[in-house]
């Protein structure tokens, strides 16, 4: 099998900038898979809800912590930042496709 390098936000692990979240706020993430392979995406200690698939709203999305993104597709998830600290987002192949979110309290 050919070696691949996967990226999140055009960055490869360990040279990543954290995705900063505001504590207590709802955040939307669009996950685009431009490859020919499906990819599971996992967020440690967070649950999220699928709200769109390929731009189409989903009213009854399931709450989960891992999502399979089909080839050549996009998924939008909603995540409430209710855990302070740093949490990994990754694809279980561990070939560069990993980053983390950092939830911080703000004075706003």
Image: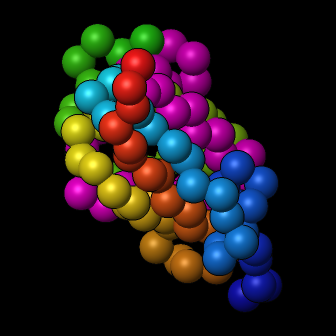
Check the image and name the residue furthest to the front. Answer: 107
- The residue that appears at 27% across and 28% down in the rendered structure is 24
In the rendered structure, which segment of residues is drawn in magenta?
27-56
Query: In this orientation, which residue lies closer to the viewer: 49 or 46?
Result: 46
Q: Is residue 41 visible?
A: no
Residue 11 falls in image quadrant? bottom right
Q: Residue at x 49, y 59 (%)?
A: 100
Residue ID at (56%, 62%): 99
Residue at 38 percent across and 43 percent down: it is 104
Residue 63 falls inside the magenta stretch: no
What quarter of the picture does the C terminus occupy? top left
Please give left or right for residue 96 compared with residue 76 in the image: right
**Relative to 95, residue 7 above or below:** above
Q: Position of residue 54 (x, y in %)?
A: 57, 24
Closer to the camera, 24 or 74?
A: 24
Instruction: Give the position of the N terminus as an image quadrant.
Output: bottom right
Residue 79 sits in which quadrant? top left
Q: Is residue 61 visible?
A: yes
The majority secondary structure of the magenta stretch comes to strand
């Amino acid at each position: 099998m050919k070696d691949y390098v996967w990226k999140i936000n055009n960055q490869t692990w360990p040279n990543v900038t954290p995705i900063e979240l505001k504590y207590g706020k709802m955040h939307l993430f669009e996950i685009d898979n431009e490859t020919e392979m499906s990819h599971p995406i996992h967020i440690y200690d967070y649950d999220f809800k699928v709200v769109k698939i390929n731009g189409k709203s989903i009213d009854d999305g399931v709450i989960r912590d891992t999502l399979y993104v089909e080839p050549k597709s996009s998924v939008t998830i909603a995540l409430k930042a209710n855990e302070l600290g740093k949490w990994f987002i990754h694809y279980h192949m561990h070939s560069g496709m990993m980053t983390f979110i950092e939830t911080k309290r703000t004075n706003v």
